[in-house]
Structure formats: structure tokens, C-alpha cells
Amino acid sequence: MTIIYEINPPKVIQDTILSHDQLSESVERLKERATKIGQASDGIHLTDSVLGIPRVSPITAGFFIRNSNSKIRITASIRVRDRNVTSITQTVCDAILLNLNGVLVLKGDTPPSGPKDSGLVPSDIVRQFNEQGFGKRIDMYLSISSNPDFEKMHKKIESQPKGFVTQVVSSIDQVTRMVDKLKPQGFRIIPCVLLSSEKNKKSAQMLNLDWSEYSKDMVGFVKQIDKIAGNVLISSPNDFTGALDLLHKL
């Protein structure tokens, strides 16, 4: 079983300079959570400013976690919506130098302020980086819908990522369909599951997610997905305690 847990790095308060103590406190809290997660899972995935809300760079967060845990697998998201190629290249180089295991290149949510769209396409970035040899130094992933239209995935497939991280899934059939189509082509499929709990209800509503198929047996659902895909990514943005409890049951 390969279980990965998704962590959102600390928020950055705009127009406010964090004091050294505040920054240290945020970093220590991140490291403490990562340590607990590391004892119950195989990997950590760090997000990049979900919903466009500024947060500490996932690469920086990965650096702090890697310093306190040299063995756990760490991957990080990289947004392209509000970045240029030079900035993205530097970020990928930093991830390699800091010994992170992989990057998920994605469009990213629209930020509340600042640049809205750089015009860059994630699959183009992955293809370009693979051509430059980055893919030999670090695993590169793209995101896909939980119900992808395979006929419209040519660009993503041709860019030859290591694999695909799905948006939140709600059924075993969704996972089976993606694995049956993409795994024979050599791609790793990482299904994302949102922990069904009261604290995560707002997140489920925002994602229009119906978790009725698995909410009564979260452990069984995750185990079944892992059996089909070979791994699973657990997301629980508002319920760390519940997620930790689930991880210990798996």
C-alpha cells in the first residue's frame, strides 16, 4: 500500500511582514505535522496556493520537511497560471537540488489579485522540460479530471509525464476507468480522495463532490483504490486529526 498525504503550506498574509517568531512558529507547525504524517504514510504532497490564496512556496516547505525527514517521498505542485518559464525552471531546479521526488505541474486557481493567466499550458511545460532532460532528474506529473475525456488528452499523453494526479474521485468506477486506459501506456495514476468528515463538508460542496459511495467505509474505499491504482493521495484541508486517524487505520 502506498499512501500519500496532501499538505497545504502556511498562508502568507499579504502586505504584512511576518516576524521571525511568526515564521518560525509556522515552520515548526508544518514540520510537526509532517513528522506525524511521515510515521503513518509513504509520502507527502505539498500544494501551491490553492484557491489562489498566497502560501509559503511548496518547494520551501519541502526543504523544511526534507531536512527533518530524509526518507519520506516528497512531491510539490507548481502553478503556471501566474508564472513565466524562467520562474518555473528555477523552481524545478530548486526542487531537484533540495532532493524532492516529484513535481505536479498544473494551471492553478485564479489568484484574487495579480496576474490572472500567463497563457502557459502545463502539458507544454512538462514536454519542454522532458526534452531538456529534467524528467531524468525528477518525476513530473500532470493533473486530470476524475472523469477525463481521453480523446482530448493527446497533448497531455504526448508530453510523457511520469503519471497523472486526479482531481478528487468519488467512485471506484472512476479509478478503474482511468487505470485501465492509462496504466497500460506506462503512466502512474494517483487518485485523490477527500476525507469525508464534517470539517471537510465545505470543501466537498465547493468541489461538487458526492461522497455518499464511500463516506460510510472510508478505510475500505481507500484500500480498494490503492489495490487498483497502486497508490492514493489523501486530501483533508480542514481536518488534520481525522486524516491522521484514517492513516493509522490503513
Image (cartoon, rainbow, N blue to C red):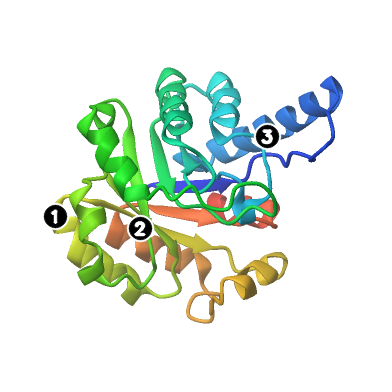
Q: Name the residue tied to disc 1.
A: 185
Residue drawn at x 67%, y 40% as measured from the top left: 55
CA distance separating discs 3 and 2: 26 Å
CA distance separating discs 1 and 3: 37 Å
Question: 11 above or below 211?
Answer: above
Question: 144 above or below 41?
Answer: below
Of the numbered discs in the image, which one, if any, rests on residue 30?
A: 3
CA distance separating discs 2 and 1: 19 Å
Picture coordinates of residue 213, whole percent (x, y): 48, 80
Q: Secondary structure at mark 2?
A: helix
Quick one: label 2 or label 1, which is nearer the N terminus?
1
Q: Quadrant of residue 62?
A: top right
Q: Label 1: how many residues lie within 10 Å, few (<14), some (14-19) or many (20+)?
A: few
Q: Name the residue tied to disc 2.
A: 226
Q: Label 3: how many residues lie within 10 Å, few (<14), some (14-19) or many (20+)?
A: some
Instruction: Count all numbered tags in the image, as a single digit.
Output: 3
Mark closer to the observer (2, 1) = 1
Residue drawn at x 73%, y 34% as measured from the top left: 29
Question: 67 above or below 221?
Answer: above
